[in-house]
Structure formats: C-alpha cells, structure tokens
Amino acid sequence: MEELIPITMFLGAFAMVFGIRYLSNKEKMAMIERGMDPGMSKSVAAPKPFLSLKFGLLLVGLGIGLIIALFVAKLYQLTEEESVAVYFGFLGIFGGIGLIISYVIEKNWIDKHPE
C-alpha cells in the first residue's frame, strides 16, 4: 500500500498542472471569442499599498491571540480539548480584530486623501 503514495502524489501533481493549463487555455479562448486581448489579463496589477499593513496587523493579532490563549490555558489548567478550543477561539478573535484595525486605518487614510 505504501508503494502507491509516490505514484498518487505524482499523478495528483500532474493532474493539477494539467488542469491549470487547461483552464487557462479555456479562459484565453473565451477572451478571443469576445474580441478581447488575452495578454491584457496578465498585465501588471495596480500596487496595493495597504497589503503589508493588513498582513502585519493580522499576524500581530494572531500572535497576541496565541499568547493570551497560552496564558488562559495555563492559568485555568484546561484539558487538552478545552485548550484547543481556546486557542482557535482567540486566534479567530484577535486575527479579526487585527483586520478590523487595518480596515479602520485604511478607511481613515482614504477619507483624508481623496484622489
């Protein structure tokens, strides 16, 4: 049975690459049918100045959530099942708080600098 693992991984990787190429070709053919230039879709994307801020605040929120979850789990001597729930809960809460803070900062900056 273990001999099938490398074969399955190879077939899965091949199928994924083939599927991506197939769907990309279908997308280009649909663009040509509509009279669009297929090279336009891969043009340089506009810069996203707040992307670093968003990821930074998300990671800070996740880090704070992990630390607080660790302290709560140790302080209340939770069982393993309870600790897992606390960790996931705090990760979601503090990660979400980080994203909300990022949104507020972006919105304030955009309101102050209309273009």
Image (cartoon, rainbow, N blue to C red):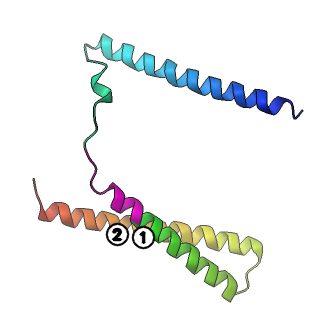
Q: How crowded is mark 2: few (under 14 residues within 10 Å), some or many (20 or more)?
A: some
> What residue is shown at x 33% (from left), y 65% (from top)?
102
Q: Where is 53 relative to 31, above or below?
A: below
Furthest residue toward bottom: 75
| Numbered disc 2: secondary structure | helix
Q: Residue at x 26, y 17 (%)?
A: 36
Q: In this view, does 1 lie to the left or right of 70?
A: right
Residue segment shown in magenta: 47-56
- Where's residue 107, x and y in %? 23, 63
Name the residue type under label 2: Ile
Q: Position of residue 86 (x, y in %)?
A: 63, 74
Give how far across and how far down residue 92 sits, in percent.
Answer: 53, 66
Q: Can you tell which quarter of the image residue 67 is in?
A: bottom right
Residue placed furthest toward the right: 1
Report which quarter residue 75 is drawn in: bottom right
* The magenta stretch spans residue 1: no
Residue positioned 48% across, 21% down in the render: 23
The residue singled out by tag 1 in the image is 97
Cα distance in 3D space between marks 2 and 1 = 6 Å
52 horizontally vs 88: left or right: left
Give the structural element (helix, strand or loop) at label 1: helix
Dominant secondary structure of the residues highlighted in magenta in the image? helix
Give the answer, above or below, for where 40 lies relative to 57: above
Q: In which quarter of the image is residue 52?
A: bottom left
Q: Residue drawn at (31%, 12%), measured in percent from left and top? A: 32
Identified by mark 1, the residue type is Ile
**Label 1 Cα neighbours within 10 Å, binned few <14 / some 14-19 / many ≥20:** some
Residue 53 colored magenta?
yes
Q: Do the residues labelled 2 and 1 touch (CB within 8 Å)?
A: yes
Quadrant of the drawing holding the N terminus:
top right
The residue that disc 2 covers is 101
Q: Residue furthest left?
A: 115
